[in-house]
Amino acid sequence: MNGRFPITLHIMTLLCKADGLLSSEYLAGSINVNAVLVRKELSNLIKHHLVASQEGKNGGYMLAKSANQISLGAIYETVKPDAILGQAKNQPNPVCPVGKQINKHLKNLYADVNKVLMERLGDTNLAEFCNKFE
Amino acid sequence: MNGRFPITLHIMTLLCKADGLLSSEYLAGSINVNAVLVRKELSNLIKHHLVASQEGKNGGYMLAKSANQISLGAIYETVKPDAILGQAKNQPNPVCPVGKQINKHLKNLYADVNKVLMERLGDTNLAEFCNKFE
DNA sequence: ATAAACTGTAACAATTTTAATTACATTAAT
DNA sequence: ATTAATGTAATTAAAATTGTTACAGTTTAT
């Protein structure tokens, strides 16, 4: 279990509440993780067009669009694992009738689960999430 | 990301289709993971009253109740992680207004997500899942 | 133009988690 | 008694995650 989603959401929350650019050092200080890790996640968010950066002195990061146009689903998408309910590294026995087919059925189930999850996360946007903070 | 859920569901599927007891070695052979790991998961399933075991020679494992009375949600419950969308090991900065509150809001979000997930998994039972296999 | 303060990223090290292995006590059938 | 199974602890090995160091590139300010 990794911490990419919580860290990414923490970043997005800070950027949402910020007025102007925030540096990766500042973000790392609030989250309390390594600044390089934060920059990696920011890099990923930029790739997904949710964050914009300004290089050079006095540079930093900001949201690439309005917080009410960024759903939590869109944020989750940026870090979504292949297998929502976990992935074993085994190769099931192809001679066993169950082993042979389990991955197909698991994949279908995961697609289903992913759908309801995304429906829920699509319901809330970043602005709403941030408004919960006092 | 770990493989507990896929392995557990694989076990349950094999037991569902079996007629009589299955040994941990047999299960491990279909899943293609170590038999001790399988026994650990079986142990967990027994603790949750989904599986029963018979010790001694010719012993093995079987479902503890009818497959149509076991929802996929109940199976998921046996291996459910604390944090469905991931948990970072950081301790957010308590001096930062966002860092101070993020875990509370994350926890609420996770509870919500967990709810829709469980609703979906509660909709399908093991018998239905197993019927998908040819 | 040069120094300073940033981003961007690669390479590596440390830590943590996951899975496999070994070992063996216990149980039950033959 | 022997055999074949479960149950579980302890250890090792492998993989994934996070942290660290290093440095090239960019922009601003002086």
Image (cartoon, coloured by chain):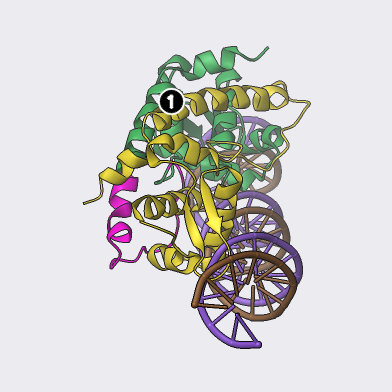
Chain colours: A green, B yellow, C brown, D purple
Residue at the spot 78% in from the left edge and 26% down from the top edge: B95
The kind of residue tagged 1 is Glu
- Residue B131 belongs to the span the image colors magenta: no
Task: Name the spot of residue C15 as percent of width and height, x first.
Answer: 72, 57
Residue A38 in the figure: left or right of residue C10: right
Task: Name the spot of residue B132 as percent of width and height, x first.
Answer: 25, 44
Residue at the spot 31% in from the left edge and 46% down from the top edge: B130
Q: In this rendered view, identify the residue nearer to me: A120 or B27.
A: B27
Q: Is residue B118 above or below residue B66?
A: above
Answer with the quarter of the image where residue A109 lies: top left
Q: How many marks?
A: 1
Residue at the spot 51% in from the left edge and 51% down from the top edge: B4
Residue carrying label 1: B119
Neighbor class of circle 1 (other Cα within 10 Å; few <14, some 14-19, many 20+) is few
Q: Is residue A118 above or below residue B9?
A: above
Q: Which residues are magenta?
A: A84-107
Outermost residue, right side: B95
Answer with the quarter of the image where residue A39 lies: top right
Residue C30 in the figure: left or right of residue B82: left
- Residue A91 belongs to the span the image colors magenta: yes
Task: Name the spot of residue C2 as percent of width and height, x first.
Answer: 65, 49
Q: In this rendered view, identify the residue nearer to me: A48 or B18.
A: B18
Answer with the quarter of the image where residue A90 lies: bottom left
Residue A50, visible in the rendered structure: no
Residue A32 in the figure: left or right of residue A131: right
Q: Is residue B114 above or below residue A2?
A: above
Outermost residue, left side: B134
